[in-house]
Amino acid sequence: MATRIERIRIKGYRSLADVEPRPDGVTVPISSNYSGKSTIVRSLDFISDIYRVGAKLVIEHQEGFDNIAERVVRLAGRQIEFEIEATSTYRDIFDSKHVISS
């Protein structure tokens, strides 16, 4: 069994002030243009990249915090926040060779 995202909450990333998509099996985001579908996918890439190479390099690659933070977050000096709930098997977790660094 692969790791499965049960819930994700994204606060302050790009145009996403505070969203909480709940994927269910195969999830296809459908909505009007400029509603944040691609930004949700980009946020997952962002989290994955941080896991792989560390926050500092990822933020530098995306041209700094001001380029990735939602406008209100930037102006208020707040943080970008991600909450993730996922399920995985014991084997999936302990067979992993990834190291989280910041």
Image: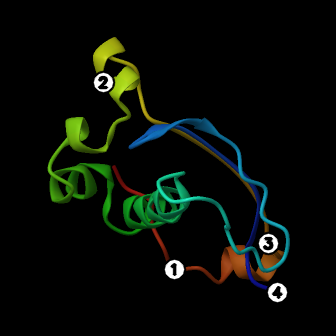
Label 4 residue SS:
loop
Residues at circles 2 and 4 in contact by the CB criterion of under 8 Å: no
- Residue 1 image label: 4
Q: Label 2 amino acid?
A: Arg
Q: Which of 55 and 71 is in front in this view?
A: 71
Q: Label 4 amino acid?
A: Met
Residues at circles 3 and 4 in contact by the CB criterion of under 8 Å: yes
Residue 41 in picture, x, y percent from top left: 52, 65
List the residue tagged with mark 2: 74
- Badge 4: residue crowd in 10 Å (few <14, some 14–19, many ≥20): few
- Badge 1: residue crowd in 10 Å (few <14, some 14–19, many ≥20): few
List the residue tagged with mark 3: 88
Can you tell which of label 3 and label 2 is closer to the viewer?
2
Q: Which of 92 and 22 is in front in this view?
A: 22
Cα gap from disc 2 to disc 1, whole angstroms: 35 Å
Q: Quadrant of the N terminus?
A: bottom right
List the residue tagged with mark 1: 97
Residue 83 in picture, x, y percent from top left: 64, 43
Q: Identify the residue at image location x=33%, y=49%.
A: 102
Residue 29 in picture, x, y percent from top left: 67, 67
Cα gap from disc 3 to disc 4, whole angstroms: 7 Å
Q: Label 1 amino acid?
A: Lys
Can you tell which of label 4 and label 1 is closer to the viewer?
4
